Image (cartoon, helix red, strand yellow):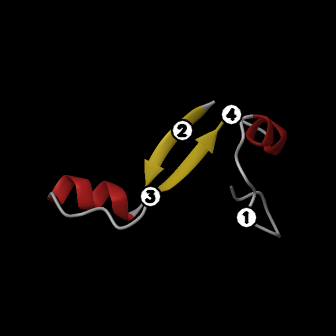
Amino acid sequence: MKIYEVGGVVRDELLGLPVQDRDFVVVGATPEDMLAAGFTPVGKDFPVF
């Protein structure tokens, strides 16, 4: 499983701005893997944790 920070957090950190929120992309994990790791699903139509 690889986890990457994406979105505005990358921009904010590069510009030295306060981080408002954090978004991640997870590669190499199934929804079952995410559940087993303790993540809570929040999406209804596709796996969002």
In the displayed image of the protein, which residue is found farthest to the left?
Answer: 16
Type of amino acid at the residue the image marks with label 4:
Gly
Per the image, the residue denoted by label 2 is 3
Q: Image quadrant of residue 32?
A: top right
Question: Which mark is nearer the camera, 3 or 2?
Answer: 3
Of callouts 1 and 3, the N-terminal one: 3
Q: CA distance from mark 2 to mark 4?
A: 9 Å
Per the image, the residue denoted by label 4 is 28
Q: Residue at x 23, y 63 (%)?
A: 18
Left or right: residue 5 versus residue 49 is left
Type of amino acid at the residue the image marks with label 2:
Ile
Of callouts 3 and 4, the N-terminal one: 3
Count the numbered circles shown: 4
Q: Residue at x 73, y 64 (%)?
A: 42
- The correct choice, above or below, for 36 with respect to 46 in the image is above
Q: CA distance from mark 3 to mark 4?
A: 20 Å
Placement of the N terminus among the 4 image quadrants:
top right
Residue 14: % across, % down = 20, 53
Q: Residues within 10 Å of mark 2 (few under 14, many from 20)?
A: few
In the displayed image of the protein, which residue is found farthest to the front?
Answer: 38
Of callouts 3 and 2, the N-terminal one: 2
Q: CA distance from mark 1 to mark 2?
A: 18 Å
Q: CA distance from mark 3 to mark 2?
A: 12 Å
Per the image, the residue denoted by label 1 is 42
Q: Which mark is residue 22?
A: 3
Of callouts 2 and 4, the N-terminal one: 2
